[in-house]
């Protein structure tokens, strides 16, 4: 199949900014260059547009107002303002990316636009990502595929995770054979488990970085626990951890997805800054370990991506609890920071070609289905 040049855009629940990534793909494989030991050279250039503190306040307010959403098209409170901002911020990110890489709109075949999740309640058949795909396509002069979760949710799926089909393509490009686990730790953490026969299951494992980031913002005015250094100085509250892990989510069989609002950093209560960070970091790691309860085969190798891959204390805890070979995505030529943006570029091409993007073993939808809404300039 012919290769397309696709840009993927991702703004996650950590609310740090817009990730931009360019890949070449036919929707089934990714164009890669291998060097020694199956190390992949970068798939393509990347870019980033950070959010200011004021912009983050707007997005947090929008997420709170989104709790009043009943129908997917509802936009109560500050959501219209936030949707306009999200669209403009993504447009700015792409325009800067094109200029920095000496690219023209005509050089790009399609953009995969995730938007900003403000509410995710698949049990009520609602998952809303704000952002206007048509406005983005019109401004940039490039076709845009957006609203990639809706078809799955409306068909009874969880609408998440969407990345597993890309994870599998990357694993095949790297020559990995199962059982292997791919763990993406963004605001929420999700795992893709590939068995020795190539079968895939995937699901959210629990909180990722979001609770830790919010704790550090509240206590220290920092956006994150840099390298996990604050958590490393603290001690986790074991009774609190034991109680957190009794949440019904952890007992549900996959496929399953997590509403970001089910857990709050305020659960750490009156703990010291260090002990609270240690507790929330341990919560993320132990929730991942609980995922093994649902694994058809225990992975012999884990690849860790997302912002959590840069948290040394979190990776240390994962090493302890998973007791398997663990490597970061960057260490094997994947991209820890931009993997999800790359995935949405991949999904946009699959959507254009009518290929399925969600599956019974990843979202619980009855049959493999495509998804996404195409907007032309």
Image: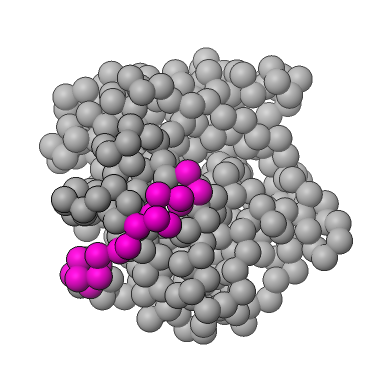
Q: Which residue shows up at 37% across the image and 69% down it?
A: 286
Residue 350, position as x, y percentages in the image: 58, 49
Relative depth, front residue between 373 and 291: 291
Q: Which residue shows up at 24% across the image and 26% down it?
A: 79
- Asked if the magenta segment contains residue 158, the reply would be no
Name above or below for residue 368 compared with residue 93.
below
Left or right: residue 345 compared with residue 56: right
Q: Which residue shows up at 45% across the image and 75% down it?
A: 321
Residue 85, position as x, y percentages in the image: 37, 20
Name above or below for residue 94 compared with residue 7.
above
Q: Quadrant of residue 282?
A: bottom left
Dominant secondary-structure state across the stretch colored magenta = helix
Q: What segment is highlighted magenta in the picture?
A: 226-243
Q: Which residue shows up at 24% across the image and 65% down it?
A: 237
Left or right: residue 268 compared with residue 142: left
Relative depth, front residue between 260 and 104: 260
Name above or below for residue 3 compared with residue 375.
below
Relative depth, front residue between 23 and 110: 23
Residue 155, position as x, y percentages in the image: 32, 57
Quadrant where the C terminus lies?
top right
Relative depth, front residue between 17 and 358: 17
Residue 168, position as x, y percentages in the image: 61, 64
Whether residue 248 is visible to the viewer of this picture, yes or no, is: no
Whether residue 344 is visible to the viewer of this picture, yes or no, is: yes
């Amino acid at each position: 199949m012919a290769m397309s040049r696709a840009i993927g855009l991702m703004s996650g629940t950590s609310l740090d900014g817009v990730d931009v990534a360019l890949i070449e793909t036919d929707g089934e494989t990714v164009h890669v260059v291998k060097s020694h030991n199956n190390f992949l050279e970068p798939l393509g250039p990347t870019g980033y547009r950070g959010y200011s503190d004021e912009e983050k306040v707007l997005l947090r307010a929008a997420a709170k107002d989104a709790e009043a959403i009943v129908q997917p098209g509802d936009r109560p409170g500050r959501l219209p303002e936030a949707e306009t901002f999200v669209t403009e911020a993504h447009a700015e990110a792409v325009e800067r990316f094109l200029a920095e890489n000496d690219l023209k709109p005509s050089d790009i075949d399609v953009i995969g636009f995730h938007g900003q999740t403000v509410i995710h309640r698949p049990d009520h058949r609602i998952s809303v990502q704000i952002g206007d795909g048509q406005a983005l396509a019109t401004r940039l002069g490039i076709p845009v595929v957006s609203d990639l979760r809706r078809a799955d949710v409306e068909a009874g799926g969880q609408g998440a995770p969407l990345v597993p089909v890309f994870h599998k393509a990357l694993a095949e490009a790297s020559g990995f054979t199962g059982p292997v686990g791919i763990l993406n730790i963004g605001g929420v953490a999700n795992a893709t488990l590939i068995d020795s026969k190539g079968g895939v299951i995937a699901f959210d494992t629990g909180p990722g970085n979001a609770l830790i980031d919010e704790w550090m913002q509240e206590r220290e005015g920092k956006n994150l626990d840099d390298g996990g250094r604050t958590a490393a100085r603290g001690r986790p509250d074991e009774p609190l951890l034991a109680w957190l892990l009794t949440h019904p989510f952890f007992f549900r069989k996959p496929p399953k997805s997590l509403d970001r609002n089910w857990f709050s950093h305020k659960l750490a209560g009156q703990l010291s800054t260090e002990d609270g960070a240690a507790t929330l970091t341990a919560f993320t790691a132990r929730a991942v370990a609980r995922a093994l309860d649902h694994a058809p085969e225990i992975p012999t190798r884990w690849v860790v991506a997302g912002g959590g891959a840069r948290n040394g204390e979190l990776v240390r805890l994962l090493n302890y609890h998973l007791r398997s070979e663990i490597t970061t995505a960057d260490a094997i030529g994947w991209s820890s920071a931009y993997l999800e943006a790359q995935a949405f570029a991949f999904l946009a091409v699959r959507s254009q070609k009518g290929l399925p993007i969600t599956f019974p073993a990843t979202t619980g939808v009855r049959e493999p289905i495509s998804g996404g809404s195409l907007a032309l300039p």
